[in-house]
Image: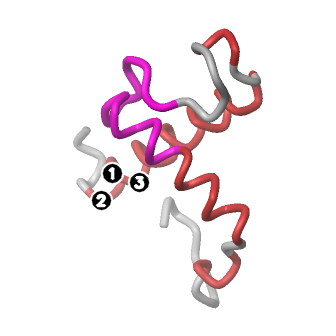
Amino acid sequence: MLGQVYRTNPRRRITEDHREMLSVWRLWRQVAGPFGQGAGHLPDAGGVQDQAAIMLDALEAMSAAEAAIRKERKGGDE
């Protein structure tokens, strides 16, 4: 995946914390759309300005990773 060769299934390295973060990202993405536009469900009360910067950075990084994976699966045509 993304040029990385894994000797074992990387899924085994996923912890409960990772699963929780994926859940937050999916809820945010459901409303925000596949490219992160708009305001999805946010983990803390309030708007974007009320969120921890590290959380917003993480959501953005996860969306960027998904976009890279989709691009690789399409053969780089995106």
First to last magenta residue range: 25-41
The location of residue 43, given as percent across then percent down, is 62, 35
Q: Specify the farthest residue to the top.
A: 49
Q: Residues within 10 Å of mark 3 (few under 14, many from 20)?
A: some
Residue at mark 1: 70
Q: Residue at x 75, y 22 (%)?
A: 53
- Give x and y (percent) for residue 2: 50, 59
In this view of the protein, which residue sits in the foreground, 4 or 9?
9
Q: What residue is shown at x 41% (from left), y 54% (from top)?
A: 69
For label 2, the SS is helix
**Label 2 with label 3: CB-CB less than 8 Å:** yes
Residue matched to label 2: 73
Query: Quarter-wise, where is residue 58 in the image?
Result: top right
Q: Are marks 3 and 1 in contact (CB under 8 Å)?
A: yes
Please tell me whether mark 1 sits on a helix, a strand or a loop.
helix
Secondary structure beneath dot 3 equals: helix
The residue under label 3 is 69
At horizontal 51% and vertical 46% (from top left) the residue drawn is 65
Q: Are marks 2 and 1 in contact (CB under 8 Å)?
A: yes
Q: Nearer the viewer, residue 60 or 27?
A: 27
Decide: is 74 above or below 39.
below
